[in-house]
Image (spheres, rainbow, N blue to C red):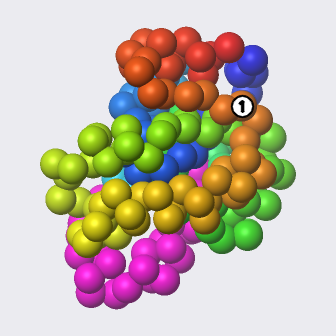
Amino acid sequence: MIRADQHVVLVGMMGVGKTTIARVLSVRLSRDVWDSDQVIEHRSGRTVRSIFAEDGEPAFRALESEVLLQALASPIPLVIATGGGVVLAEANRRALCESGARIVWLCADPATLVDRVKSGGHRPLLDHDPAGTLQRMMSEREALYREVADAIVLVDNRSVSEVVEAVLR
């Protein structure tokens, strides 16, 4: 159950629907959405793709960590949609676990993710072999998502409203 004073943080692989679910949750909970990729793009004036291309993944991950810590520090409860790789940094996992936030891992089969992300050109990590990359990333990240999650919500073959209801339980 989500407390009135508690952030709701959505973690999970790219393409799982964190941004979409966050938007619907924000309406249901009457809270603002903090979408980390969108915040990074707004502040930097560049796309995630251009940050990766020009500055590299480590620079993007540093921005991602900074944005996460700012969101978690907000005194106003937010719905926070993280980037898929936010759990890669131990400091981020620690911050998530110590934040008191309700952390929900949105989980999908890699085949579902491949189908969802095939049309998106804004995911630079998927430029070559999306299916293989997603499978490898899921293998590397599964234990990390599990480490931080208070709840796991499977999204395969579920509507947005079904996923939102599961998150709210």
Relative horizontal placement of residue 14, taking residue 80 as reference (left or right):
left
Q: Nearer the viewer, residue 23 or 140?
A: 140
Q: Nearer the viewer, residue 132 or 87?
A: 132
Residue 87 in sight from this viewpoint: yes
Quick one: which residue is furthest to the bottom in this view? 55
- Which amino acid type is shown beneath numbered disc 1? Ala
Category of crowding for the residue at label 1, using alpha-carbon neighbours closer than 10 angstroms: few (below 14), some (14–19), many (at least 20): some
Quadrant in which residue 154 is drawn: top right
Q: Is residue 130 above or below residue 106?
A: below
Tell me what residue is drawn at x 40 percent, y 65 percent: 133
List the residue tagged with mark 1: 151
Quadrant in which residue 125 is drawn: bottom left
Asked whether residue 115 is drawn in magenta, I would say no
Q: Is residue 35 above or below residue 17?
A: below
Quadrant in which residue 106 is drawn: top right
Relative horizontal placement of residue 110, taking residue 121 as reference (left or right):
right
Relative horizontal placement of residue 111, taking residue 10 as reference (left or right):
left
Relative horizontal placement of residue 151, taking residue 80 as reference (left or right):
right
- Image: magenta residue range: 42-71
Q: Nearer the viewer, residue 135 or 25?
A: 135
